[in-house]
Amino acid sequence: MRSIILLLFLVATSYSFGQQLVYTPKNPAFGGDPFNYTWLLNSANAQNPFSDDSLSGLDNLDALNNSLNNQFTGGFDNNNTPPLGTSTDGNLQYEVYESNEGLVINVLDITTGEQSQIIIPN
């Protein structure tokens, strides 16, 4: 009986195959599948308990957008151009001048030093 069990054990082990284990990363930054990126980002954002307070400056941008929209839709004189020169509105300073490219509006946030440039072609 023992010889039959030993024989079955030897036969079973001779037919078992092993294969080499290969590591494949999940993160696309380390060579993983790029389709995993969205899932990993959403999973990380769902687990993040912190909020970004630096986005509070968007209120000023909304005010700027509304101000520019009001000015461009008829808040100017008869030729419908903004007044040239420098003006200040809250934390934002505007510089408006004509150039070869068209009307240039430089916007400077006085508190942070960030600036943007809007060019309206001729």
Image (spheres, rainbow, N blue to C red):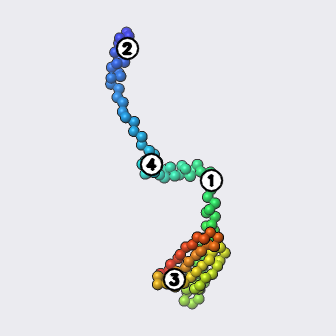
**Pointer 1 with pointer 2, Cβ within 8 A:** no
Question: Which residue matches tag 1?
Answer: 50
Question: Which residue matches tag 4?
Answer: 30
- Where residue 88 sits, quadrant-wise, is bottom right
- Where residue 82 sits, quadrant-wise, is bottom right
Q: Residue at x 49, y 50 (%)?
A: 39
Q: Residues within 10 Å of mark 3 (few under 14, many from 20)?
A: some
Residue that extends furthest to the front in the rendered view of this protein? 113
Disc 4 from disc 2: Cα separation: 48 Å
Q: Earlier in the sequence, mark 1 or mark 2?
A: 2
Residue 68: percent from the left, percent from the top?
Answer: 58, 78
Give me the disc on residue 5. Answer: 2
Amino acid type shown at disc 4: Phe
Disc 4 from disc 3: Cα separation: 46 Å
Q: Residue at x 35, y 12 (%)?
A: 4
Q: Earlier in the sequence, mark 2 or mark 3?
A: 2
